[in-house]
Image: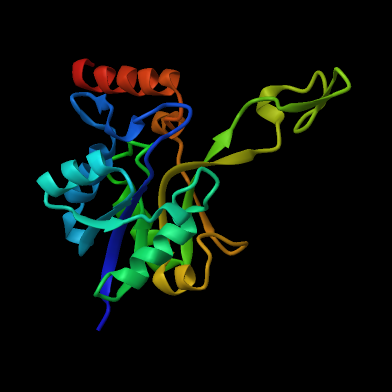
């Protein structure tokens, strides 16, 4: 019988924009440990946590914290390699069957405390095969062509509060059926969009400035 939920945290070495970002210390601990700790805080819903990586330092730290490690071979570790291949590799390697995969990205270290609880409830009640978290974009967006700005989601002079809502994939959390991953998909047109209106949704670490913003939020949480 398949176990219920497996958390997978995919990590690759040698980030171009922010070298060694996965092990940079954020609030005193390596960045990727924030996602591991979040999973541990929700242990009642999780059967196992796995890190898949080609980063030796990540492996050392994960081992110290008794987290299962799967080798991410170089052919699925490239800068342009999609996440799906790492998830499929985990399912093909691990010696257990799981119903659902919870994907946590290390670059999104801050998550609302009850996010996973609420996501799994929606996933079950909606009969989803996949769920992703999204956030409303409240800005006036446009495109520039031939040095001319052309509004995309509004008309010049239109009030911000009258904009047609647009949403962005914030990367905080994904829940996907294992069957869907085996077919080669994380999301499709039937993916349930779980709307998150929280300041954490803006934290996605790819640059030094992103890292500093995450530190700011953590200090604000600790000191009020």
The residue drawn where x is 33% and y is 17% is 216
Q: Is residue 127 visible?
A: no
User: Colour scheme of this structure image?
Assistant: rainbow
Name the residue at 42% across, 30% down.
205
Quadrant containing the N terminus in the rendered view: bottom left
Residue sitting nearer the eye, 159 or 224: 224
Q: Is residue 1 above or below residue 40?
A: below
Q: Is residue 93 left or right of residue 183?
A: left
Q: Residue at x 61, y 29 (%)?
A: 138
In this view, the residue in front, 48 or 20, is 20
Q: How many marks?
A: 0
Give the image location of residue 15, x and y in percent. Answer: 43, 34
Please state the horizontal and vertical placement of residue 214, each as a whole percent of the image: 35, 24
Is residue 133 in view from this perspective? Answer: yes
Q: Position of residue 129 (x, y in %)?
A: 47, 68
Given the current orientation, which residue lies at the most extreme front position?
74
Q: Quadrant of residue 94?
A: bottom left
**Residue at the location (26% across, 25% down)?**
26
Please identify the residue farthest to the bottom as the structure is shown. 1
Residue 129 relative to residue 117: left or right: right
- 153 relative to 179, above or below: above
Q: Position of residue 46 (x, y in %)?
A: 22, 60
The quadrant of the rendering that contains the C terminus is top left
Q: Nearer the viewer, residue 131 or 108?
A: 108
């Amino acid at each position: 019988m398949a176990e219920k939920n497996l958390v997978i945290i995919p990590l690759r070495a040698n980030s171009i924009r922010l070298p060694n970002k996965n092990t940079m210390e954020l609030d005193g601990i390596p960045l990727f440990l924030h996602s591991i700790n979040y999973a541990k805080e929700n242990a009642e819903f999780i059967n196992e946590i796995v890190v898949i990586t080609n980063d030796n330092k990540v492996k050392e730290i994960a081992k110290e914290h008794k987290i299962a490690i799967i080798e991410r071979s170089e052919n699925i570790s490239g800068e342009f390699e999609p996440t799906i291949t790492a998830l499929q590799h985990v399912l093909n390697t691990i010696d257990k069957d799981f119903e659902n995969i919870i994907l946590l990205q290390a670059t999104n270290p801050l998550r609302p405390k009850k996010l996973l609880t609420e996501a799994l409830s929606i996933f079950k009640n909606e009969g989803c095969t996949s769920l992703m978290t999204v956030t409303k974009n409240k800005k006036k967006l446009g495109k520039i062509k031939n040095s001319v700005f052309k509004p995309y989601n509004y008309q010049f002079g239109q009030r911000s509060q009258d904009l047609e809502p647009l949403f962005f994939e914030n990367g905080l959390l994904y829940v996907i059926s294992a069957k869907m991953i085996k077919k080669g998909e994380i999301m499709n047109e039937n993916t349930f969009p779980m709307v998150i209106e929280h300041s954490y949704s803006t934290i996605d670490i790819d640059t030094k400035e992103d890292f500093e913003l995450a530190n700011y939020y953590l200090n604000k949480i600790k000191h009020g």
